[in-house]
């Protein structure tokens, strides 16, 4: 089966991680897979090496000074649409709003649903839901939102997890990060409203009263959107609270498992998620996870994580997690190990076969 997977970026965002891992698993299963992506800012490849069995088609996408978010979204769609050639593929599968707009009539994975105020983004989001010929969701909760909001029924295929990569981190690798930060609370995904960073800062300030040696580290943050105003808000609140916020930005792929495994607690107070892959990777590493009490995260993590709903409850759970439960840790590592990309690929191939048969 000849499969085209489309994503919007070469950077290490959750949807891009998903795309590459799925592509590699599909190739292992015998599919002929090509990943298409915009290559922003002169990128010549993805953030990590990709299995050579997967073909890569990167479409140059130059930076334009002074371009608004809406203009950049529309240009992204246009550039990818002009470059993409659907001939030669049995299945075209878009992984995000931009690529789904660039190739109408594709299959689409809806990782999570957003609410946008920028007109171009709102229109892009709507078209990327209603125009695809089939839909996949990575959790039941998101599939339920799709059905309730649009009457669309999606196939649910949970993410895989590269659990061994995070479980096999050496003490030396953990020690590099612990030597730099001491005992630390880690968040991955950058500073943005959807990641609940402001609540995390507030919670950390409260937790530090009981754990004054605890540091707060935030990694990642590649995004198409301009969150400078929110970041300034977070930085201002951190300064008011006397919080020394350690912001790492993007972390090299090879270094990320050590950073995650070295953490005392993984903070994941997102306000919207489709699955929570970064938190699942932390569980694979044996790190306790404190996350927001959302239906999707209850579904995905169950009893393997601790849940909060506001800074006070997050702080309570963070300090409790500093003395981790062996039972919860075992549940977390078992949960992560049970999510296989090969199983996800097999489920996708069944969807692809049904879609190709319906189109014949």
Image (tube, grey):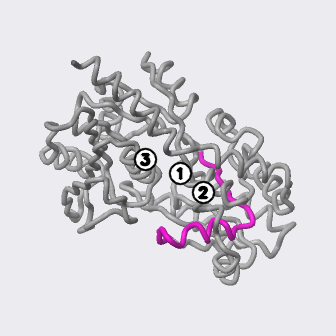
Give above or below for 353 relative to 256.
above
Earlier sequence position, callout 3 versus callout 2: 3
Element on which disc 1 rests: helix
Query: Is 167 left or right of 231, judged from the image as shown?
Result: right
Give above or below for 190 relative to 328.
below
Residue 127, by quadrant, is top left
**Within 10 Å of the Cα at label 3, are there few (<14), some (14-19), or many (20+) other Cα atoms?**
many
> Mark on residue 193?
1
Q: Nearer the viewer, residue 160 or 153?
A: 160
Which region of the structure is painted magenta? 249-270
Is residue 265 in the magenta section?
yes
* Mark 2 lies on residue: 197
* Mark 3 lies on residue: 25
Q: Which of 222 and 225 is in front in this view?
A: 222
Earlier sequence position, callout 1 versus callout 3: 3
Residue 42, by quadrant, is bottom left
Q: Cα distance, mark 1 to mark 3?
A: 32 Å
Q: Would you say residue 272 is visible in this rendering?
A: no
Q: Which of 79 and 89 is in front in this view?
A: 89
Return the x and y of residue 177 as percentages of the image width and height. Answer: 65, 78
Q: Would you say residue 175 is visible in this rendering?
A: yes
Q: Cα distance, mark 3 to mark 2?
A: 33 Å
Looking at the rendering, in which quadrant would you find the N terminus?
top left
Element on which disc 3 rests: helix
- Give the mark toward the camera: 3 or 2: 3
């Amino acid at each position: 089966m000849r499969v085209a997977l489309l994503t919007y970026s070469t950077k290490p965002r959750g949807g891009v991680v998903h795309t590459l891992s799925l592509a590699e698993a599909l190739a292992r299963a015998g599919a002929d897979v090509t990943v298409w992506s915009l290559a922003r800012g002169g990128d010549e490849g993805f953030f990590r090496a990709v299995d050579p069995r997967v073909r890569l088609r990167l479409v140059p996408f130059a930076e334009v000074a002074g371009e608004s978010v809406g203009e950049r979204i529309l240009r992204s769609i246009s550039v990818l649409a002009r470059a993409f050639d659907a001939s030669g593929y049995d299945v075209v599968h878009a992984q995000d709003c931009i690529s789904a707009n660039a190739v109408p009539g594709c299959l689409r994975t809806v990782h999570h649903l957003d609410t946008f105020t920028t007109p171009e983004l709102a229109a892009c989001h709507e078209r990327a839901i209603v125009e695809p010929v089939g839909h996949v969701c990575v959790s039941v909760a998101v599939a339920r939102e799709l059905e309730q909001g649009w009457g669309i029924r999606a196939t649910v295929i949970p993410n895989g997890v590269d659990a061994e990569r995070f479980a096999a981190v050496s003490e030396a690798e953990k020690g590099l990060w612990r030597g730099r930060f001491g005992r630390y609370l880690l968040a991955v995904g950058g500073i943005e409203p959807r990641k609940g960073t402001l609540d995390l800062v507030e919670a950390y300030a409260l937790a530090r009263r009981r754990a004054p040696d605890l540091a707060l580290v935030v990694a990642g943050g590649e995004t198409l959107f301009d969150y400078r105003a929110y970041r300034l808000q977070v930085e201002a609140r951190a300064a008011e609270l006397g919080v020394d916020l350690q912001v790492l930005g993007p972390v090299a792929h090879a270094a990320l498992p050590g950073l995650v495994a070295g953490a005392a607690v993984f903070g994941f107070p997102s306000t919207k998620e489709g699955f929570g892959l970064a938190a699942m990777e932390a569980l694979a590493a044996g790190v306790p996870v404190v996350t927001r009490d959302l239906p999707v995260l209850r579904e995905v993590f169950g009893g393997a994580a601790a849940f909060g709903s506001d800074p006070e409850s997050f702080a309570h759970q963070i300090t409790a997690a500093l003395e981790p439960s062996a039972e919860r840790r075992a549940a977390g590592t078992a949960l992560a190990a049970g999510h296989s990309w090969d199983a996800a690929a097999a489920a996708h191939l069944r969807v692809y076969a049904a879609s190709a048969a319906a189109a014949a």
